C-alpha cells in the first residue's frame, strides 16, 4: 500500500508541478479545469448520481460554466470568489452542526449546487493566483500552506491530540492537530514574508490571512469527509492508486485556494 | 421655471421607477398566490383608490417619493384561518425570495427596455476627437495630438465621448499604464498610446476623467454671438439681443466666446463698453455685469475669483454648428439591440457596484453621493436636453435603484433576501430578535446614507 502510494506520487507530483508552473494563461486554465472537472466527476457520485449518463451530463454542464466564465472574462474575476466565500459560510455551518440539519443539504440538487460554489471558485482562484507576480509565486504559497497544514496537523495530532475537532464528521481529527497545522503554516508565511515582502506590516497581514486560510483548509477537508460519510464511502474514486480520488487530494485546496485568492486580490497589501 | 420643471421631472422619474419596482413585487406575489392588500404609489394618505375583484386596493398617495405593496402577513396582523394559505409568511422560502427579488429585477428589466429603445431609435453622438492636449499631462507624455480620434480605452472599443467617459470612469483608482488607441487625422491606422497615471481620479469630486489625462474634447469654435438673453438681468437691461455679435470690450477686440466670458467674469459691478455688431453696423453699448456667488465647482477651478464673486450678465451663447464629419449616428437592429441593451445594463450594474466598493474603500469621495436634490436637477437637465438623454438617465437611475435595493441591509430587499438565504441554509427562519436587531442597524445605515446624500446635495447647490 505504501509502495503504491509512493509510486503514484512519483509521477503525480512532477506532472502537477509542471502543469501548475510550466503553463500559464489559457493553457494553465485548461489544465486547472481538467483537475477541477475530474473532481467534479467524483463529486457527482458523492451527490448521489449513479447513471454514467447523468454524471457525464453534470460534468459537461460544469465544463460549460467554466467556459462561459472564461469567455466573459470572469475566469480571474473577484465575484466568483465572493460567491465561493459565501458558499463556504454555508458549508461551514452545515459541517459544524453535522449530523443535525443534514436534511438541508442531503439532496442531489443541493449537492450539485454545492459543487458549483466549491469547484468553480476554486478554479477561478487557481487562475487568479497563477497570475500573481513573479511566476505564480502566491499559488506556490497556498499549495505550501495546505501541505504544511496537513503535515503539522499530522504530527501535532499524533503527539498531543486529545480534544476531538469534529467527532461526527472525521473522528481522527483533533484541535491540537489544527493548532499544530497553524504553527506550521505560520512558519511558511513568515518565510514568504521575509523572502517576498521584506516589510513588517504586510508580513503581519500575511500571517493573519494564513491563520484564516489554514482553518478554512481544514473545513475543506471536513466538508468532503462529511459528504463521503453521508454516502457511506471512503475514497471519492480510485483514480490515483494509493491516494484515492482527485477530490481526496484537493479537498483542502478547494476551500483554501478561493479564500486566499480573494484575500490576495482584495485585502492583502501585496 | 427650472425649479418647476425639475420638480415635475423628479416626480415623473421617481414615480415611474418606484411604480415599476413595486409592480415587480406585486406581479410575482399574485403569481405565487399571495393576497396583496394594497398597491400604493406614493406614501401617506391615499388621494385616490379603487379595489379590484381580488380585494387589492390600488391607491395613489400624497407624498410622491416612493410607494409600497402591502401583502397579507400573519406577522403584521392576525389573519383569519380561511385566508392563511394566502399569507406571505406561509409561502415557501423560494416563493418568498422570488417575490422580494422581483422588485429589483423589474428595475433591471426597465433599464434593458430603455436602453433597447435608445439603441433602436439610434443616437447621434459626437466623434471622440481630441481638441487640445495640456502640456506635460499624461496625454502629452504619451504623444497624443489634437485632432487624434480615440478608438479604444484599455482594449475596449469606443465610438463616442460617452463610451470614452464610461470606460475611463470604470478605471478609478488605476495605477500605472492606461492604454489608449487613437487614429490621427491623416493616418488610417490606429496607434497605441500608453499614458502614465497614478491613483487615477482618486478622491476627485466630481471625477474629471478626461481633464485628469490632459485631454479636452474637440469643439467647434464658438463665435461671440449672443443666444438666449435672461429677462431683467444686466444684458437685457443694456438692450442686448439674441444674435448680437460682440466685437470688443473696452476697445480690446474679442475673437471668441470664451474670451468674452472671461472678461465678464473678471468685472463684476464694473461698467464696460462693448462693441456690438447688429444687422451689419457696429454700435457701442454700456454694460454693467451683476455679481454672482460662484458655485463650489467654479470656486475650486478659479481660485482667484473666490471672494468678490464673479461677473454675470444673464446671456448665453448662440449654439455653434457641429460639422457633419464630427457627428455619427449609432443605431442597431431590434435583435442586436437586445444584446447591446443587456450588456449595457450589466456594465452599468458593475460600474455602480464598483463605485460603492470604491466609496467604501476611500477611492471615491463620499461627496459624490447624490440625493433627491441632485437627482431632481439632473432629471430636469436631461428632460430639457431631449428624449434620449432623459431615457438614458431613467435607465441609469433604475439600475442604481435596483442595485441599492439589493445591498444586504435589513429594511432593503437585499436584507430580506439575506435572511431568506440564511433560512435556506439553516432550515428555519432567522429569530425575530435577530431580525429586530438587524432592522435597527439597517435603519441607522440607510438613514445615515440618506442624510449624507441630502447634505452633499445641498452643499452642491452653493
Image: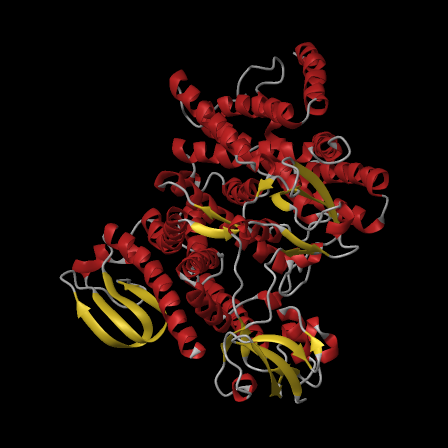
Picture colour scheme: secondary structure
- Vertical relation: B86 (above or below) A76: below
Q: Who is closer to the viewer here, B328 or B447?
A: B328
- Residue projecting furthest to the front: B281
Examine the rendering and report whether any part of residue A205 can be seen: yes
Residue A46 location in percent, x, y? 47, 26
- Vertical relation: A93 (above or below) B103: above
Image quarter in which the N terminus of chain B is found: bottom left
Q: Who is closer to the viewer here, B399 or B387?
A: B387
- Residue projecting furthest to the left: B53
Number of callouts in the render?
Answer: 0
Examine the rendering and report whether any part of residue B172 can be seen: no
Name the residue: 61% across, 38% down: A258
Q: What is the quadrant of residue B201 in the picture?
A: bottom right
Residue A247 location in percent, x, y? 57, 25
Residue B139 location in percent, x, y? 73, 50
Residue A71 location in percent, x, y? 53, 32
Name the residue: 59% across, 67% down: B223
Q: What is the quadrant of residue A100 in the picture?
A: top left
Amino acid at each position: 500500500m505504501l509502495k503504491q502510494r509512493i509510486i503514484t506520487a512519483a509521477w503525480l507530483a512532477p506532472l502537477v508541478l509542471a502543469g501548475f508552473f510550466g503553463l500559464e494563461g489559457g493553457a494553465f486554465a485548461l489544465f486547472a479545469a481538467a483537475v477541477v472537472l475530474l473532481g467534479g466527476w467524483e463529486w457527482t457520485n458523492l451527490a448521489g448520481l449513479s447513471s454514467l449518463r447523468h454524471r457525464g451530463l453534470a460534468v459537461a454542464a460544469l465544463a460549460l460554466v467554466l467556459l462561459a466564465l472564461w469567455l466573459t472574462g470572469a475566469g480571474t474575476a473577484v465575484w466568483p470568489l465572493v460567491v465561493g466565500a459565501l458558499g463556504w459560510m454555508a458549508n461551514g455551518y452545515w459541517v459544524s452542526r453535522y449530523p443535525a440539519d443534514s436534511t438541508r443539504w442531503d439532496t442531489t440538487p443541493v449537492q450539485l449546487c454545492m459543487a458549483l460554489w466549491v469547484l468553480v471558485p476554486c478554479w477561478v482562484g487557481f487562475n487568479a493566483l497563477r497570475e500573481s507576480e513573479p511566476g505564480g509565486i502566491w499559488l506556490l504559497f497556498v499549495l505550501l500552506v495546505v501541505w504544511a497544514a496537513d503535515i503539522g496537523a499530522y504530527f501535532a495530532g499524533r503527539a498531543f491530540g486529545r480534544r476531538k475537532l469534529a467527532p461526527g464528521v472525521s473522528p481522527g481529527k483533533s484541535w491540537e492537530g489544527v493548532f499544530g497545522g497553524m504553527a506550521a503554516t505560520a512558519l511558511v508565511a513568515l518565510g514568504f514574508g521575509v523572502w517576498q515582502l521584506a516589510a513588517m506590516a504586510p508580513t503581519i497581514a500575511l500571517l493573519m490571512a494564513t491563520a484564516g486560510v489554514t482553518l478554512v483548509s481544514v473545513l475543506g477537508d471536513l466538508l468532503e469527509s462529511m459528504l463521503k460519510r453521508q454516502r457511506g464511502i471512503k475514497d471519492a474514486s480510485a483514480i490515483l492508486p494509493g491516494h484515492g480520488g482527485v477530490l481526496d487530494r484537493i479537498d483542502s485546496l478547494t476551500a483554501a485556494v478561493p479564500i486566499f485568492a480573494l484575500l490576495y486580490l482584495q485585502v492583502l497589501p501585496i | 421655471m427650472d425649479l418647476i420643471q425639475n420638480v415635475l421631472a423628479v416626480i415623473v422619474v421617481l414615480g415611474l421607477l418606484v411604480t415599476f419596482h413595486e409592480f415587480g413585487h406585486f406581479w410575482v406575489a399574485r403569481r405565487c398566490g399571495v393576497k396583496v392588500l394594497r398597491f400604493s404609489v406614493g406614501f401617506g394618505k391615499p388621494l385616490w383608490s379603487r379595489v379590484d375583484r381580488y380585494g387589492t386596493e390600488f391607491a395613489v398617495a400624497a407624498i410622491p417619493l416612493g410607494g409600497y405593496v402591502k401583502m397579507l402577513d400573519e406577522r403584521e396582523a392576525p389573519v383569519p384561518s380561511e385566508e392563511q394559505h394566502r399569507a406571505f409568511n406561509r409561502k415557501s422560502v423560494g416563493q418568498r425570495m422570488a417575490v422580494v427579488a422581483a422588485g429589483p429585477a423589474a428595475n433591471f428589466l426597465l433599464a434593458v427596455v430603455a436602453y433597447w429603445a435608445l439603441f433602436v431609435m439610434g443616437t447621434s453622438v459626437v466623434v471622440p476627437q481630441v481638441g487640445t492636449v495640456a502640456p506635460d499631462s499624461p496625454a502629452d507624455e504619451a504623444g497624443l495630438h489634437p485632432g487624434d480620434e480615440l478608438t479604444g480605452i484599455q482594449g475596449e472599443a469606443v465610438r463616442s465621448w460617452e463610451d470614452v467617459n464610461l470606460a475611463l470612469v470604470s478605471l478609478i483608482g488605476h495605477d500605472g499604464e492606461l492604454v489608449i488607441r487613437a487614429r490621427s487625422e491623416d493616418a488610417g491606422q490606429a496607434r497605441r498610446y500608453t499614458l502614465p497615471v497614478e491613483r487615477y481620479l482618486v478622491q476627485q469630486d466630481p471625477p474629471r476623467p478626461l481633464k485628469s489625462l490632459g485631454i479636452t474634447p474637440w469643439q467647434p469654435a464658438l463665435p461671440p454671438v449672443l443666444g438666449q438673453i435672461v429677462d431683467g438681468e444686466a444684458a437685457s437691461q443694456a438692450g442686448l439681443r439674441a444674435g448680437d455679435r460682440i466685437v470688443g470690450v473696452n476697445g480690446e477686440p474679442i475673437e471668441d466666446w470664451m474670451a468674452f466670458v472671461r472678461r465678464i467674469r473678471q468685472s463684476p459691478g464694473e461698467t464696460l463698453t462693448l462693441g456690438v455688431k447688429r444687422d451689419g453696423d457696429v454700435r457701442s453699448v454700456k454694460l454693467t455685469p451683476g455679481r454672482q456667488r460662484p458655485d463650489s465647482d467654479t470656486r475650486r477651478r478659479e481660485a482667484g475669483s473666490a471672494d468678490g464673486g464673479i461677473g454675470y450678465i444673464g446671456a448665453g451663447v448662440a449654439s455653434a454648428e457641429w460639422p457633419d464629419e464630427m457627428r455619427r449616428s449609432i443605431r442597431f437592429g431590434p435583435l442586436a439591440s437586445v444584446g447591446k441593451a443587456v450588456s449595457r445594463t450589466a456594465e452599468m450594474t458593475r460600474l455602480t457596484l464598483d463605485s460603492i466598493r470604491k466609496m467604501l474603500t476611500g477611492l471615491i469621495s463620499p461627496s459624490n453621493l447624490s440625493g433627491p436634490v441632485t437627482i431632481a436637477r439632473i432629471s430636469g437637465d436631461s428632460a430639457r436636453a431631449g428624449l434620449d438623454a432623459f431615457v438614458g438617465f431613467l435607465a441609469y437611475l433604475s439600475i442604481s435603484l435596483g442595485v441599492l435595493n439589493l445591498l444586504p441591509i435589513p429594511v432593503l430587499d437585499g436584507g430580506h433576501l439575506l435572511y431568506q438565504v440564511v433560512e435556506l441554509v439553516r432550515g428555519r427562519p432567522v429569530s425575530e430578535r435577530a431580525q429586530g436587531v438587524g432592522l435597527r442597524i439597517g435603519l441607522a445605515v440607510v438613514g445615515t446614507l440618506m442624510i449624507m446624500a441630502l447634505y452633499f446635495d445641498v452643499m452642491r447647490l452653493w
